[in-house]
């Protein structure tokens, strides 16, 4: 009994310790616990030296890099999974992660498959797709030249901000040991943090705006989470075309199945460590929670919706971002 009570806090402390930097790293003020990296709030396991390394020549980019760039909770893992299959990697075994074939170079703390050293990331052969020949890399960073200047390809995934807020809330509670003191945060309190830009990677609207500026470059492909839900085969074909890989109808159908929500929920993180951490409450709730459209209806209130619409009108409408890419039609009282 004593063991059952004592273990979770110890585990949580261990997880927190392994994913947090030392005192040399500048912190973002306030709650949740975040780092200040290039003036942006970053997840504690993303540090200033790693972002320096990515931009100062330590990281060796390749013309065969394809970045899956996203604001958090917009379909990153889904898209990585699709890219991995197009690239020729085998289906994940239980307990493997899409990171196994598509690492996240921004992460400098923790263990593989979350964290790899820049030397490991630079080992192109290790990540090279057996069919596509691409090195897939994940990013939650705002637009930066090391990802999208000439040559490298990018897939930027977008999702409406109301579902993002809802999903981000559950994510922050699940990974409370990363953010510290977030296990019991209410949705409304979390929404205030989101409004203030005090969440990983800062303000949603600024993030979208930074990538929207390069949307029409031929090496950049924009994909919507909502389109992935509505017609995954069509989006898989667009991604394959962007990677210069031809797919048979049968293989497209196979990727639809292998990247389906049901399948990912079944396999992703089904390893013993994850199961134990979830069982003892060190991880709260599932990583793949709902994978649906409109989950915001249960949590986002009228005032929060109005704030999001106002932000859209101020920051993204002038750039030409379609409203329904950011605010679902139903949230402004239209059918849809
Ligand atoms: C790149 O940044 C890292 C981390 O800050 C630093 O250790 C390294 O010396 C830098 N390299 C160059 C070539 O500036």
Image (cartoon, rainbow, N blue to C red):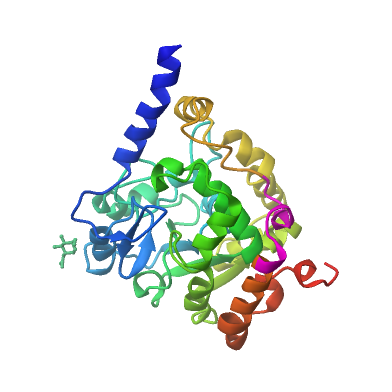
x and y percentages locating residue 301 in the rendered image:
70, 61
Q: Please name whichever residue, 121 or 50, is drawn nearer the observer in this view of the structure.
A: 50
Q: Residue 74 sits in which quadrant?
A: bottom right
x and y percentages locating residue 184 in the rendered image:
52, 42
x and y percentages locating residue 89 in the rendered image:
50, 45
The residue positioned farthest toward the top in the image shown:
1
Q: Residue at x 64, y 43 (%)?
A: 289
Apparent side of residue 83 relative to residue 335 in the rendered image (left or right): left
Looking at the rendering, the quadrant in which ligand 1 lies is bottom left
In the displayed structure, 239 sits above or below 109; it is below
Is residue 71 visible in the rendered image? The answer is no
Q: Residue at x 41, y 70 (%)?
A: 152
In the displayed structure, 77 sits above or below 323; it is above
Q: Is residue 257 magenta?
A: no
Is residue 131 visible in the rendered image? The answer is yes
In the displayed structure, 184 sits above or below 226; it is above
In the displayed structure, 287 sits above or below 74; it is above
Apparent side of residue 182 relative to residue 239 in the rendered image (left or right): left
Q: Residue 258 sits in which quadrant?
A: top right
x and y percentages locating residue 204 in the rendered image:
52, 68
Apparent side of residue 320 relative to residue 32 in the rendered image (left or right): right
Number of numbered tags placed on the structure image: 0
Q: Is residue 301 magenta?
A: yes
In magenta, the rendered stretch is 290-303
The residue positioned farthest toward the bottom in the image shown:
318
Q: Please name whichever residue, 38 or 186, is drawn nearer the observer in this view of the structure.
A: 186
**Quadrant assignment for the C terminus:** bottom right
Q: Residue at x 56, y 51 (%)?
A: 169
């Amino acid at each position: 009994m004593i063991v059952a009570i004592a273990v979770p806090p110890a585990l949580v402390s261990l997880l927190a310790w392994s994913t947090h930097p030392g005192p040399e790293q500048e912190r973002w003020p306030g709650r949740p616990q975040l780092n200040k990296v290039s003036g942006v709030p970053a997840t504690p396991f993303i540090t200033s030296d790693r972002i320096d390394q990515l931009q100062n020549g330590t990281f060796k980019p390749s013309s065969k890099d394809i970045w899956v760039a996203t604001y958090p909770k917009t379909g990153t893992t889904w898209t990585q999974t699709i890219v991995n299959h197009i690239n020729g990697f085998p289906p994940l075994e239980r307990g493997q992660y899409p990171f196994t074939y598509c690492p996240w170079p921004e992460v400098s703390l923790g263990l593989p498959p979350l964290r790899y050293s820049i030397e490991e990331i630079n080992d192109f052969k290790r990540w090279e797709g057996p069919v596509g020949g691409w090195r897939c890399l994940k990013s939650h960073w705002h637009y930066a030249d090391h990802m999208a200047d000439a040559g490298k390809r990018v897939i930027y995934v977008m999702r409406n901000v109301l579902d993002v807020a809802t999903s981000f809330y559950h994510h922050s509670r699940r990974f409370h040991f990363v953010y510290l003191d977030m296990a019991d945060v209410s949705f409304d309190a979390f929404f205030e943090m989101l409004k203030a830009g005090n969440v990983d990677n800062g303000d949603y609207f600024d993030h979208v705006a930074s990538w929207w500026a390069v949307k029409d470059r031929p090496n950049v492909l924009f994909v919507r989470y909502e389109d992935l839900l509505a017609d995954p085969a069509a989006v898989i074909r667009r991604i394959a075309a962007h990677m210069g890989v031809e797919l048979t109808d049968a293989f497209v159908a196979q990727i639809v199945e292998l990247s389906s929500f049901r399948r990912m929920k079944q396999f992703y993180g089904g390893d013993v460590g994850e199961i134990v951490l979830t069982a003892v409450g060190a991880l709260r709730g599932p990583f793949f929670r709902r994978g649906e459209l409109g989950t915001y209806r249960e949590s986002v209130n009228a005032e929060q919706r109005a704030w999001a619409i106002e932000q859209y009108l101020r920051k993204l409408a002038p750039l030409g971002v379609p409203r329904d890419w950011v605010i679902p039609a139903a949230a402004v009282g239209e059918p849809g």
